[in-house]
Amino acid sequence: MIKVCILTSVHSRTDTRIFIKQCRSLAAHGYDVTLIVADNFENEFKEGVKIVDVGRWPGRLNRMFKTTSRVFKKAVELESDIYHLHDPELMPIGLKLKRLGKKVIFDSHEDLPKAILSKQYLGPVSARVLLSATTSLFERYACRRFDGIIAATPFIRDKFLAINPNTVDINNYPMIGELDAAVPWAEKRDEICYVGGIAAIRGAFEMVEAIGKVGCGLLLAGNIESGIESRLRKMPGWRYVEALGFIDRSGVQDVTARSMGGLVLFHPEPNHINAQPNKIFEYMSAGIPVIASNFPLWKEIIEGNECGLCVEPLDPKEIAAAIDQLVNNPNLARSMGENGRRAILEKYNWPIEAEKLLKFYAALV
């Protein structure tokens, strides 16, 4: 039996992409899978996957040095055939594993150099540009030496194909049926939802301002970025908001079931324009229309499948008009929701991506 070690120093042991999709799919097809995490919970065996915790320290620097050191030590102890890394900070230990003769895969969830440009906490623009360029050089150096690259989107895949020819995109498409709505459309409330991290660059202020113009409910399901909640609560539109905090997968199903549409209003940052947020496809899977930023790729998915509306994400008036259109035209909203679910069943689903993952692994071994 092929032993696979999947490593993360950042994500939770129940992460949708890592555990629910990849780990479970590999284990179900005969691989001996161990997931290394850093979350200060007990080791466990869950759905065919051994989960091993190396502990967590507070602070980003501790995580990048102490935690990754422990992840490496545990990875070596496991003596696996394939090591699958999920975080950029693990690339240095990936190089160490390569020097030990191991097969190493890097799973790129985002275009990291572009993402750095949007992270204001990293300092002024000049510092971020320098860090982005340095990160890009190291990323190219490391990923040329790995045995394969898995990319979360076709755009990221195309970037890495120029670095490592053994690159494949494994998209974060939904599990079929996971978010099927149980609420008949006639019983839905006049509510719109947003599920995910709530941040300024993800349209938090525009969502609240727009909902204030419409006057329907806004369900915010996710953790709110540090420093912005007090400002959001002072906005007139906040009286229409129900802030639910972080919710599990069952909670996501409940929220999307009662909503008439889902919002994805990311700002036009370099790392957003060619991204494929999970929530787009999760709303489609739940059978509700999507109101999303008018990026070309997103328009191709949403307008191409007639499953929602694309708007200028920095214009609360245009966002409000789109929300109003769905809330006041339930037949249109239902039709768009049905189109989205049909597209999920036909092409945007995890079973198709799982086959690509298994084929990629089979080629390695």
Image (tube, helix red, strand yellow):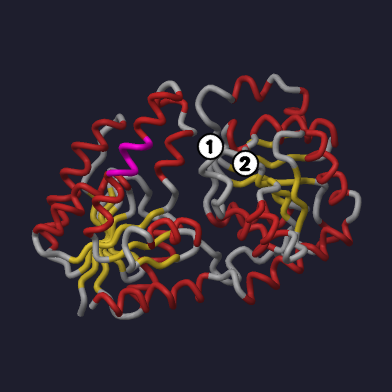
Q: Which quadrant holds residue 323?
A: top right
Relative to 322, 145 lies left or right: left
> Is 220 covered by the magenta stretch?
no
Residue visible at 37% across and 76% down in the picture = 358
Q: Which quadrant holds residue 79?
A: bottom left
Distance from the alpha carbon under mark 1 to that under mark 2: 16 Å
Residue 255 in the image: above or below residue 336? above
Residue 339: horizontal and vertical position, in percent? 75, 68
- Most prominent secondary structure in the magenta stretch? helix
Q: Secondary structure at mark 1?
A: loop
Residue visible at 44% across and 65% down in the picture = 169
Give the residue furthest to the front: 162
Q: Which residue is mark 2?
A: 266
What range is drawn magenta here? 132-137
Q: Quadrant of the N terminus?
A: bottom left
Residue 251: horizontal and vertical position, in percent? 59, 52
Name the disc covering residue 223, or none. 1
Of 316 and 245, nearer the camera is: 316
Count numbered badges in the picture: 2
Relative to 51, 292 lies left or right: right
Relative to 365, 226 lies left or right: right
